[in-house]
Amino acid sequence: MLLLNALSIFRHFALEKSSHLCTLCGSKFEFACMLQVHLSRAHGVGAKSLVCEQCGKVLPHRRLLLQHIYNRHSDRQFPCPDCGQVFAHRGKMETHRAIHSSVKPFGCAHCPFTAVRRDNVLLHVRRTHRMASNSKTDVIFNGETAHQ
């Protein structure tokens, strides 16, 4: 009996396994249920709203509310020396600092768009060109395809 249930579960997932594309950001998922989780967590689609008592920001999940409180209202603060924006994590502040640079070493392989950070080019490819981005072929770094 247990084997039959395990086999039917395996068949269920094997049939369901395909490419499910998020129409809001272009992310791909193997399973429809993972797309639903993504839509809820990343875009707030179909989620209940929770309000931060400290600032009034509305968030779709308890996990995101707790993350927001930790990141925005905790005592840990790392201000950007260039603009003063405050971060709860030093690494996030360091990543942010790249936007203040005039050097844009990452470019789109499909158009003249350039950016300071590779992830911004990948986001550009998904949103502007409506393509699932591939960091090995869509990002150009110093005239060559970036493999970072």
Image (cartoon, rainbow, N blue to C red):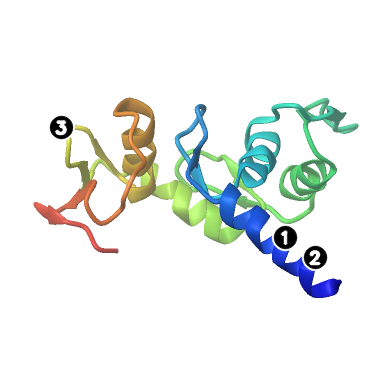
Tell me which residue sits at (66%, 63%) in the image: 10
Q: Residue at x 85, y 33 (%)?
A: 52
Query: Answer yes or no: do the residues labelled 2 and 1 have beta carbons within 8 Å?
Result: yes
State how far apart marks 3 and 2 are (Cα). Answer: 54 Å
Q: Position of residue 15 (x, y in %)?
A: 58, 51
| Residue at image mark 3 | 112
Q: Which mark is residue 22?
A: none
On the picture, is 136 further left or further right than 9? left
Q: Where residue 61 sits in the image (x, y, percent)?
A: 80, 39
48 or 56: nearer the viewer: 48
Q: CA distance from mark 3 to mark 1?
A: 47 Å
Q: Mark 3 Cα within 10 Å, few/some/many (few <14, many 20+)?
A: few
Residue at (72% x, 60% y) in the render: 9
**Closer to the eye: label 3 or 2:** 2
Name the residue at 86% across, 71% down: 1
Badge 2 is on which residue? 5
**Residue occupied by mark 1:** 9
Q: Secondary structure at mark 3?
A: loop
Mark 3–mark 2 CB contact (< 8 Å): no
Amino acid carrying label 2: it is Asn
Q: Secondary structure at mark 2?
A: helix
